[in-house]
Image (cartoon, helix red, strand yellow):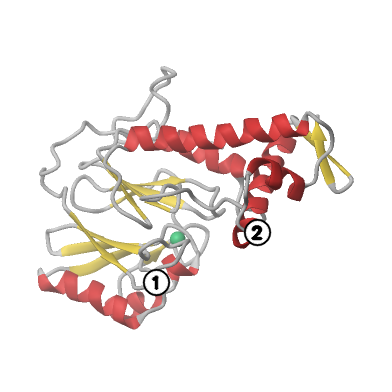
């Protein structure tokens, strides 16, 4: 992935890094460092307690991150929360186009008149590395495909908070399944945000993550372990996706079979793209 100037780069590898992209760590109570979460009433195994809508900014203008599902009561709660402190909604940001994040966007846009910004759609699509105006030094857009091809995260620079959408969740793992999802892109996106200085991750679902570096490493380690298991299972000869899911997910709950096979296929597509596995008819084999 090409990185335009001013976007995060790895410090560990000694490459240059923009001073704007990664700001000094600040105390959690620093001006502009507070944010509010309003969780929508759409709980499920995939959305956990429901979609988190965030409000940031204290100086009369608020930025909404992820409007949430199409639910007028949820939009009313978001507007009440902003209005209670005398703020108007000045900007609406969306992490990706899945309905549990985007569904309320049109209604919120209509009711506030604020610009609605997302990746690859709308009048003014977001750009990678773009700095958006907000209290606390602004919010930088980081393109993070994988869960969905139009996925971005929002890095709030002063407080060093990452609004992670569905790149990282408060608990459990993220669904990465073809055709919309790409494991190769997803791991690259995780590696990319691992280079940011972070105090907190505010996820699209579930509670705030207070150990960002550890959590990102855990996410990467889990996917690398799955990949190792798949390569190990393939070594015995060509296998189908269903076979591999059985081999890797012992005692698989039938209700989770679709998700498990989708995840296996996502790993296989990554291995094929990297020249480490190949398709043999309907099966997969080592390269
Ligand atoms: Zn979601």
Q: Pinpoint residue 46: horizontal percent, then vertical percent.
A: 47, 61
| 24 to the left or right of 31 | right
Q: The C terminus appears in which quarter of the rendering? A: top right
| 204 to the left or right of 230 | left
Residue at image position (18%, 52%) is: 135
Disc 1 to disc 2, how far (Cα)? Answer: 22 Å
Say few, some or many: other residues with alpha carbon within 10 Å of mark 1 (under 14 / 14 to 19 / 20 or more). Answer: some
Q: Which residue is mark 1?
A: 42
Q: The N terminus appears in which quarter of the rendering? A: top right
Residue at image position (45%, 51%) is: 152
Q: Secondary structure at mark 2?
A: helix
Q: Pinpoint residue 127: horizontal percent, then vertical percent.
A: 45, 50
Say few, some or many: other residues with alpha carbon within 10 Å of mark 2 (under 14 / 14 to 19 / 20 or more). Answer: few
Q: Along the line of sight, which residue is nearer the eye, 47 or 32?
A: 47
Q: Which residue is mark 2?
A: 258
Task: Answer whether residue 3 is visible to the viewer in this image.
Answer: no
């Amino acid at each position: 992935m090409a990185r335009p100037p001013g976007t995060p780069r790895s410090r560990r590898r000694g490459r240059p890094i923009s001073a704007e992209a990664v700001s000094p760590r600040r105390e959690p109570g620093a001006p502009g460092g507070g944010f509010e979460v309003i969780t929508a009433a759409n709980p499920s195994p995939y959305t956990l307690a429901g979609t988190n809508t965030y409000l940031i900014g204290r100086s009369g203008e608020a930025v909404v991150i992820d409007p949430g599902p199409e639910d007028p009561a949820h939009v009313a709660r978001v507007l009440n929360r902003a209005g209670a402190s005398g703020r108007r909604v000045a900007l609406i940001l969306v992490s990706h186009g899945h309905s549990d994040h985007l569904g309320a966007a049109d209604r919120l846009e209509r009711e506030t008149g604020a610009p609605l910004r997302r990746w690859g759609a709308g009048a003014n699509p977001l750009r990678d590395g773009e700095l958006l105006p907000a209290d606390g030094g602004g919010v930088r857009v980081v393109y993070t495909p994988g869960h969905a091809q139009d996925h971005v995260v929002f890095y709030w620079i002063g407080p060093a908070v990452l609004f992670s959408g569905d790149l990282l969740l408060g608990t459990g793992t993220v669904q990465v399944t073809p055709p919309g999802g790409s494991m190769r892109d997803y791991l690259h996106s995780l590696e990319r945000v691992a280079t940011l200085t972070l105090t907190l991750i505010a996820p699209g679902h579930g509670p705030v993550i207070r150990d960002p570096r550890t959590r990102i490493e855990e996410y990467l380690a889990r996917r690398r372990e799955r990949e190792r298991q798949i390569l190990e299972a393939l070594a015995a000869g060509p296998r189908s996706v269903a076979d591999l899911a059985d081999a890797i997910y012992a005692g698989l709950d039938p209700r989770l079979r679709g998700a498990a096979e989708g995840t296996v296929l996502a790993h296989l597509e990554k291995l094929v793209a990297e020249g480490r596995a190949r398709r043999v008819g309907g099966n997969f084999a080592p390269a």
